[in-house]
Amino acid sequence: MKAAGLKAIDIVMESQAVLISSTTSGSLSPKLSQQENGTLQTLITNRIRGVIAAKRYVLLEYNVPRSILSEAIKITPGKRAPTISPLESPGEQWVAVSVMVERKDAAQVMDHLENKGASDILVFDIINSRQVSMK
């Protein structure tokens, strides 16, 4: 609205989306079996969780000398663990690190990494994600 030069003058209605599921009250679709309906519920729930996580996190990638990798990982531990890939570089061994960080913390994390000696620090938006919960 702001981009079009408009402003809200009053609220007509407020709403929210809610996903409700029941294991005892029939199925989502009479054409699907109970197992297929359970699978469909899981699919919808996972897709919603993926979009929510994508809005909360960004993908941070950076290069760092292996000699200070442990210090960099303390700054970016990731949700489970960072992905670390070796770089083909002569001389000192470097690695590329890829990790999810909370969007709100991205600028501060980049500053800390740069101060430690990381370079080529990039931030990417995540459109969607899938996560396996750790138990």
Image: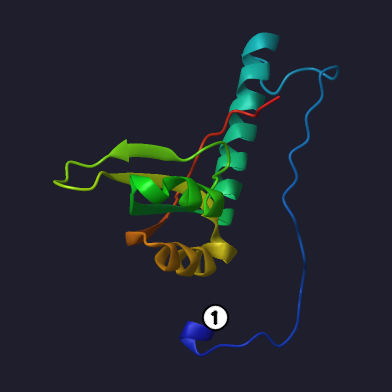
Quarter of the image with the C terminus is: top right
Q: Is residue 33 visible?
A: no
Q: Is residue 25 visible?
A: yes
Residue 119 screen position, x and y as percent? 31, 61
User: Which residue corresponds to the image point at 56% horizontal and 41% vertical from the top-left?
Assistant: 50
- In the displayed structure, 85 sits above or below 21; it is below
User: Which residue corresponds to the image point at 49% horizontal and 51% vertical from the top-left?
Assistant: 71
- In the displayed structure, 130 sits above or below 32; it is below
Residue 25 screen position, x and y as percent? 84, 20
Of 42 and 34, nearer the camera is: 42
Residue 46 appears in which quarter of the rendering? Answer: top right
Q: Is residue 130 left or right of residue 8?
A: left
Circle 1 crowding by C-alpha within 10 Å: few under 14, some 14–19, many from 20:
few
Quarter of the image with the N terminus is: bottom right
User: Which residue corresponds to the image point at 62% horizontal and 13% vertical from the top-left?
Assistant: 36
Residue 78 appears in which quarter of the rendering? Answer: top right
Of 76 and 25, nearer the camera is: 76
- In the displayed structure, 88 sits above or below 41; it is below
User: Which residue corresponds to the image point at 16% horizontal and 46% vertical from the top-left?
Assistant: 89
Amino acid under disc 1: Met
Residue 133 appears in which quarter of the rendering? Answer: top right
- Which residue sits furthest right? 24
Name the residue that disc number 1 marks.
1
Residue 32 screen position, x and y as percent? 62, 13
Q: Is residue 84 left or right of residue 106?
A: left
Q: Is residue 83 left or right of residue 119?
A: right
Residue 49 screen position, x and y as percent? 62, 40
- In the displayed structure, 87 sits above or below 27; it is below
